[in-house]
Amino acid sequence: MERNRLDISRRKILFGALQGAGVLLLSGCENIFNQLHQNRKVLSLLESVEGLNRRLLRFLTGSNKLAQEFSEKDISRTFKPNGNPPPFTMEYVMNAMSGWPSWKLEVGGLVKQPGQFSLNDLKAMPARSQITRHDCVEGWSAIGKWKGVPLTEIMKVVQPDPQAKYVVFYCMDMDTESNNFYESIDMVDALHPQTILAYEMNDQSLPIEHGAPLRLRVETQLGYKMAKYIQRIEFVENFKEIGQGKGGYWEDRGYEWYAGI
């Protein structure tokens, strides 16, 4: 995604939320919005709408409702990569050229058994394959086949503590200002059967542009939630001290934390 296209401001997101809630019913109300935007109580109210939407959607659909799955004949011929460009550091390039021999996934935080997993370790675990549609916030979609280890299999090994409420994914890719990408989901999505750490796409090793060696697939949300180039996972009670406290790279720049579809 090009930064100038996807760096949606918090101001525009809030303005859209007000319009969607029916608060701004007439044209020419942006001056009113500018005043409201300075009001912390209003901002707090708007941010609470996201949590309400999340709870309502899960109530209506069920927390374990599966995203639609497709057949092999439905797989898209082209599948645009989303997110930042690959992390072309020397370490990353050398690892990619030699099949990821020194890459390891670190898993820690509020867990009983922190661990490190090589790509071969992950491939030795029970796997899931699924053919699903990727919906991008830009308005395009594509269908692809993904294979990987369910996040629940990792959780069985590391044993998250009861106070762990969120899972944070730290990535190797970064923007032009050297800010690393990160993303988070709650335990409901972490336990969802279609939430996997994918290492294959369309029966091939995960391509560089699609997040090799490992990317998140959380099929109940929009594409920007699906972290690529993952190098570390942390189980946390909250994410208010991570980044700008909004739960993800794009969320820190105005996107909604919950992007359910």
Image (cartoon, rainbow, N blue to C red):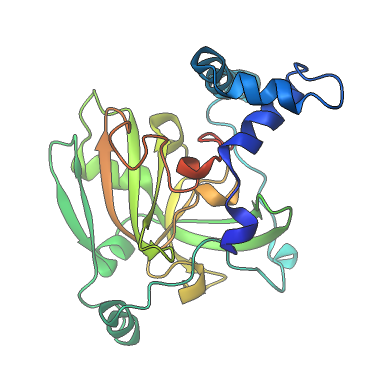
Question: In the displayed structure, does residue 80 sit left or right of residue 213?
Answer: right
Q: Is residue 39 above or below residue 205?
A: above
Q: Nearer the viewer, residue 214 or 122?
A: 214
The quarter of the displayed image where residue 176 is located: bottom left
Q: Nearer the viewer, residue 139 or 186?
A: 139
Residue found farthest to the right: 27
Residue at image location 28% in from the left, 49% down from the top? 233
Q: Does the rendering let one see residue 30?
A: yes
How many numbered marks have been drawn onto this rendered protein structure?
0
Return the x and y of residue 38 as percentages of the image width and height.
55, 22
Q: Nearer the viewer, residue 218 or 7?
A: 7
Q: Is residue 85 above or below residue 52?
A: below
Return the x and y of residue 84 as percentages of the image width and height.
49, 64
Residue found farthest to the left: 113
Question: In the displayed structure, does residue 54 sit left or right of residue 99?
Answer: right
Residue at image location 86% in from the left, 26% down from the top? 27
Q: Quadrant of the N terminus?
A: bottom right
Q: Quadrant of the C terminus?
A: top right
Return the x and y of residue 163 as percentages of the image width and height.
24, 23
Residue at image location 28% in from the left, 34% down from the top? 241
Q: Does the rendering let one see residue 18?
A: no
Return the x and y of residue 194 as percentages of the image width and height.
51, 45
Residue at image location 13% in from the left, 36% down from the top? 112
Question: In the displayed structure, does residue 76 sit left or right of residue 81?
Answer: right
Q: Nearer the viewer, residue 39 or 129?
A: 39
The quarter of the displayed image where residue 184 is located: top left
Question: In the displayed structure, does residue 147 sit left or right of residue 116?
Answer: right
